[in-house]
Image: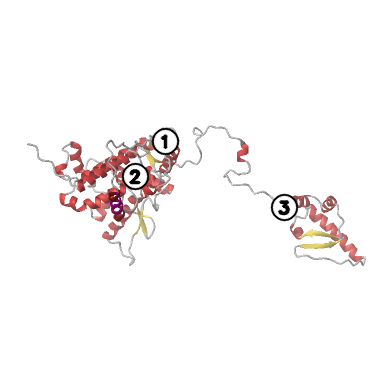
Amino acid sequence: MQAPLPQQTVSNLKSIHLLRALLREASYLPDANARQYFRRYIVNRFRAYQPAHNASPSFHAKAVEKERHGFGKRRDISIIQDRTREMQHRGKKGLNYLRRANNGEYLCLQKILYFTYGRIGERKYALLEHLLRPDDPPAVEESSPLQKLYYSNERYLSFFDAPKKASPTHHNIQISDRYRRLKTAIKSQVQNEIALGREIKRPHLHTPINNVWERPMPIRRARNNVRRWYAETMTRFLPPLPAEEFDQIQAMAHGKEKISLVKRRSPAIELHPSKELPEADRFAKRVQDALILEKPSKADACIRPRRIDARFMRRMYAAILTYSSKLEWNDRYKKWESVWGNRLNEMNSELNSEAHHDDLFAGVDEKGNLLKQRDSSLAKEEEDVKQFLNSSLADYQKAKGKKEKYTVVPFYVDFLPPDHPVRIATKKIWAKDRIHSASGASTPRKTDVNNRSIRT
């Protein structure tokens, strides 16, 4: 005889409606990988808080119990009852976040893609787990040099080599050559200065040899220094993606691969509409809804949602590409190389093949800045100065065609070379002036701060 089904409570029905709403909203995400990732994420989270007597006997449901991080591990019935209201509230917040992402909010959709492609969240540590395996696993597992030196079998110590002295006061602890992929990826990220938050300072641990009393560093403190550096580095580290996934993002960012956008389904039509309530009941319902005081979400307050099209998604993929990389094996040098994606600095010629005229870019430089329009009077004055310096003083006066009582000589004449035409002409004028002064002529002089007046 089949066991009777458990009675459906209001809380159970609310969780079922929330699950259906989350799965429906996740199916509208503009990325195919994001739709698959969040579908598994939502289902596993609800399975973890499903009572054991309601669990499905399928093989996949039993495999959830063996999750590494305990992410999908089924909770005890007492924990489920205590956390039901809190988890329903978190699920509603997640539903509003998915709605905002589907409405085209840039930061929400960007965070969704960060989760999908392992820049943050659980998948980041799943990708990191592949790098934390030795490239050539030994037949017999041996302790690493740092584990032997610090008398500990902690796992984080197995990723490092023995300390090497870098200065009289400090030594460096490098990542072991058994983890060449991990070492290459961290070193490449430090060299390219890429990080979502604070950058990684060094690809190795730089730690003091002695403590503040100039005594040998205690082993416990040395272990803690390694542990803190390892935890901080793994938090800021961006693990490389699989090569196929990286190439797919790059192809979609460059417009070489079609982006899998989906259309929102039309709402269902009510087959048996309810009868209109009388005026008294409508007033009572309106008062009851007003007393609930539910705060509207940002998804409901979005008046003008942004249209998500292929151009918008190409920019999103280009932004994700700057924080993504892949590892490639170099057969020539027999080593791993890390390849990082670059932001698109110019438009792809395949996306915009229309011809343009040169007049569209007239008056701007290579960076798109407007060229400064020079004043005509200033340009004329500069041209006069060039003419004055490149010709003799007499030719300059002749070209001016003016008869002045005083000839103004610039103050920088003494700094010109001796063979300069202006300085030679000035010497002739000085000589003529001395002869004129010796003859007894008295002509008033004018002086200036920057110029010397010579009588002619």
The reply to whether the C-beta atoms of the residues labelled 1 and 3 are less than 8 Å apart is no
For the point 82% across and 65% down, the residue is 446
Q: Which mark is residue 252?
A: 1
**Helix or strand or loop: what does disc 2 sit on?**
helix
Up-down relation of residue 371 to residue 246 (above or below):
below
* Residue ranking furthest to the front: 279
**Predominant SS along the magenta part:** helix
Q: Nearer the viewer, residue 336 or 46?
A: 46
> Callout 1, which amino acid?
Met
Say left or right for 420 vs 276. right
Residue 101, horizontal then vertical, whole percent? 37, 44
Rendered image coloring scheme: secondary structure
Count up the numbered dots: 3
Q: Which residues are magenta?
A: 282-287
Residue 167, horizontal then vertical, whole percent? 39, 57
Q: Nearer the viewer, residue 277 or 432?
A: 277
On the image, numbered disc 2 is attached to which residue? Answer: 98
Say left or right for 71 vs 349. left
Q: Locate the C terminus and report the quarter of the image it occupies.
A: bottom right
* Residue ranking furthest to the right: 439
**Helix or strand or loop: what does disc 1 sit on?**
helix
